[in-house]
Image: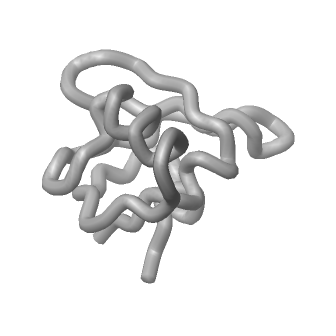
Amino acid sequence: MKTLKEVPIGSTVTIVKLHGEGAVKRRIMDMGLTKGTQVHVRKVAPLGDPIEVTVRGYELSLRKADAQMVEVQ
C-alpha cells in the first residue's frame, strides 16, 4: 500500500481508496479527493508538512496526516 504522503514530487497518481472514519473521511472527500481521481504532487514544504497537490484543476495543500489516509497507485 502506497499513500499520498510517500509520492515523490512531480509524480501523478490515482486514488485507490480513502482510509479514515466519519467526519475526517468526509472532509477529505469534500476537498475533491475521491476514488479514481488523479492527483499531481507539486511541492512539499521544507519540513515535509504540508504537501501541495493539484486535483481537479486546482491547488490543494494537505497535512501529512491527511495525505497518509489516501491510498494511491
Relative side of 13 to 46, left or right: left
Residue lying farthest to the bottom in this orientation? 1
Compared to residue 66, the image places residue 51 above or below, namely: above
Color theme of the render: one colour
Q: How many marks?
A: 0
Give the residue at x 33% y 38%: 29
Residue lying farthest to the front in this orientation? 22
Q: Give the image location of residue 47, x and y in percent.
A: 85, 41
Q: Give the image location of residue 44, x and y in percent.
A: 64, 38
The residue lying toward the viewer, choosing from 67 and 8, is: 67
Give the residue at x 56% y 64%: 6
The residue lying toward the viewer, choosing from 34 and 48, is: 34
Give the residue at x 47% y 49%: 22
Q: Quadrant of the N terminus?
A: bottom left
Q: Give the image location of residue 45, x and y in percent.
A: 73, 33
Residue lying farthest to the right in this orientation? 47
The residue lying toward the viewer, choosing from 53 and 9, is: 53
Residue 46 occupies quadrant: top right
Residue 33 occupies quadrant: top left
Q: Quadrant of the C terminus?
A: bottom left
Relative side of 8 to 39, left or right: right
Relative side of 55 to 28, left or right: left
Q: Give the image location of residue 28, x and y in percent.
A: 43, 38
Residue lying farthest to the left in this orientation? 36
